[in-house]
Image: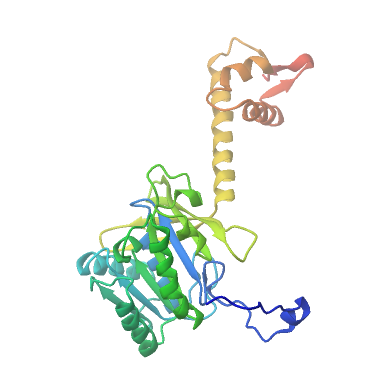
Amino acid sequence: MIKDEFKVVDIVDLMDADIPNIEYLIEDIIMKGGLTYFVGQSGSFKTGILMKAVLCGATKDPFLNIPVKKSFKTLWIDEENGQVILRTKILQTVKGHPTASKDVLKGKTYFTIIEGFKFHEAYIKLLNKIIKDNQIDLVVIDSIARTMIGSERDESDVNKILGMIKPIMEKGTAFAIIHHTRKGSEGTLDDIAGSRDFAAMADYVYMVSFNHSTSTGKQFQFKCVKSRVTEGSLDINFHVEGTKDKLDITYAGTTKQAVQSANQTKQQRCTAEILKYIQSHQTIRKYKSSALITQFKKPFSESLVRRSIADLSESGILTKEKGGVYSVSA
């Protein structure tokens, strides 16, 4: 039906309107009545970090250093793992979450496990009933590839999903949907597999990606690549240390802090390498800074080498003379 006219609202009237403010289940990640995608390649710990978020929602513990103001109830629709793998993941994650006792968790999180859920009108009615009966605040879909009807590349098929869940979201229930990225992902919205409408219909999109291995486990990046609300993009790291019985998932600082730390470590290595070189050439008592830069800029960089020379000068190992020459202190 085509409208005869559009209602126009004055800006001041809109500002004064009795419209509720935005509320969050988890600040800047999962919005009440909103849609968040957790995307990443296979093995990027998408399910694991979302399960941690759900536990934090049950216990009111901070999620990756982000406060959870009040507990919330979750319905997790699993069409990806099956009961054996899902139960194992739950037990591992709960064991690494000290406050997640059975008494606390009881009645806070529910699962459907390989029930054949699809985005179909009949199943949406069943979903509505579960949400109403259990007062669900968040619905997790794992994964979109297993639950949608049609092709993830078809815009009309993707938009049908939003059409089905929008009335549910308007009543205040949030959705967190797990989806995959294309091979060779560079961590942008364009890397989300299938139609671009996946990203277009989301309030938040978080990219989960493997960062590097550590001496005790693995570090991952959790980065906001789309937000309808906030200007600043959350970009943080988390560390996973696990055994077959337990997974410890801990906040590992912002990506900016991680880069600064890595650069500092590289700076220390650069200084150590220059010092080792000087000590192994004891017959040479003077060096031109340009010669040291040429010697070490490939494994490091010119700026790092210059800072290392300055550090060695400040510590008294080198003494600065004229013309960019440094003498080795006695």
Residue at the left extreme, as displayed: 84
- Judged left or right of residue 82, residue 218 is right
Q: Is residue 232 above or below residue 14?
A: above
User: In the displayed structure, does residue 118 sit left or right of residue 34?
Assistant: left
User: Going by the picture, which residue comes out furthest to the top?
Assistant: 283
Q: Going 67% across and 26% down the picture, which residue do you hit?
A: 306
Work out whether residue 248 or residue 208 is closer to the camera in this orientation and state it: 208
Q: How many marks?
A: 0
**149 versus 260 height, above or below:** below
Location of residue 314 in the rendering, given as x and y in whole percent from the top left corner: 71, 31
Q: Is residue 266 visible?
A: yes
Report the residue at 25% width, 72% height from top: 113
- In the picture, measured across the screen, residue 195 lies left or right of residue 306, that is left
Q: Position of residue 152 (x, y in %)?
A: 36, 57
Q: Residue 308 at what x, y percent from top left? A: 64, 29
Residue 107 visible in the displayed image: no
Question: Which residue is painted at 52% across and 63% down in the image?
Answer: 204
Q: Is residue 102 above or below residue 213?
A: below
Q: Nearer the viewer, residue 248 or 82?
A: 82
